[in-house]
Image (cartoon, helix red, strand yellow):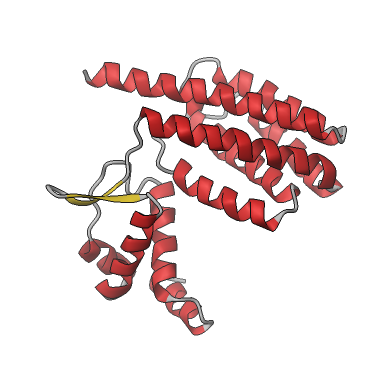
Amino acid sequence: MSVKSAILGDRKSGSPRAEQVRHQILEAIRQRRYGPGERITETEVATWLGVSRTPVREAFRRLETEGLLTFQSWRGVVVADLDRQQVSELYAMRQALEGTAARLAARHIDEPEIDLLEQLLARSAEAECSAEDLAAVNRLFHETIYAAAHNRYLLQTLEQLRNALALLRGTTYAVPGRPATALSEHEAILGAIRARKPEDAEEAARAHIAAAQKCRLQLMADAVHITA
């Protein structure tokens, strides 16, 4: 099914077209069709999706409100590019929310979800995985914990956080040694969840995000050094 057909189909079921356009732009940002700091125009998106500029304009406004797009007077609308302070704030929220998700998962997770987490850990331990492959498995691991928390309101908040994470450049799995340490941290989180120890699960999740933040800031510092 084409993107245009999908949008029209969803419209028939009652979903606003602008929301469908917003979703497609979000996916394009996640897939790096539009990267941080890159210009994005209403005309280009309308042509790509086969829709008029009206729903695109509305989707742009929503994404600007959410902080994913920003307007620059000399360039127009661009994908937001987070600075060091914004990244630190984002990771502070990750520690709080993912710690809560792990705590709730330790209370509410079911066996199929535990099995899936174990399978994902096994995949991330495969030596031939690239940094991008590991990052994809990492996202699935975290999203499985979100779902295992069995709390719809937390899940909605984490979805907003996931949108903001799409603005980050590259992957921390490119930092030397990070794949091995991240695997160990994931094992600690899963061990606490499997043992039904909420406090330990939250502590392990918070420690994991804190370590990821250090790697993220290192990536940003390295990028500045390279381009200087």
Left or right of residue 207: residue 39 = left
Determine the image quadrant of residue 62. Answer: bottom left
For image coordinates 69% across by 40% down, the residue present is: 100
Q: Is residue 105 above or below residue 183?
A: below
In front here: 138 or 5? 138
For image coordinates 60% across by 55% down, the residue present is: 156
Q: Where's residue 224, x and y in %?
A: 29, 21
Left or right of residue 220: residue 213 = right
Q: Is residue 128 above or below residue 39?
A: above
For image coordinates 62% across by 19% down, the residue present is: 180
Q: Where's residue 146, x and y in %?
A: 67, 46
Numbered circles on residues, count = 0
Q: Where's residue 16, x and y in %?
A: 44, 76
For image coordinates 28% across by 63% down, the residue present is: 45
Q: Where's residue 35, x and y in %?
A: 32, 43
In front here: 190 or 213? 213
Can see residue 170? Answer: no
Determine the image quadrant of residue 196. Answer: top right
* Residue, far bottom: 12
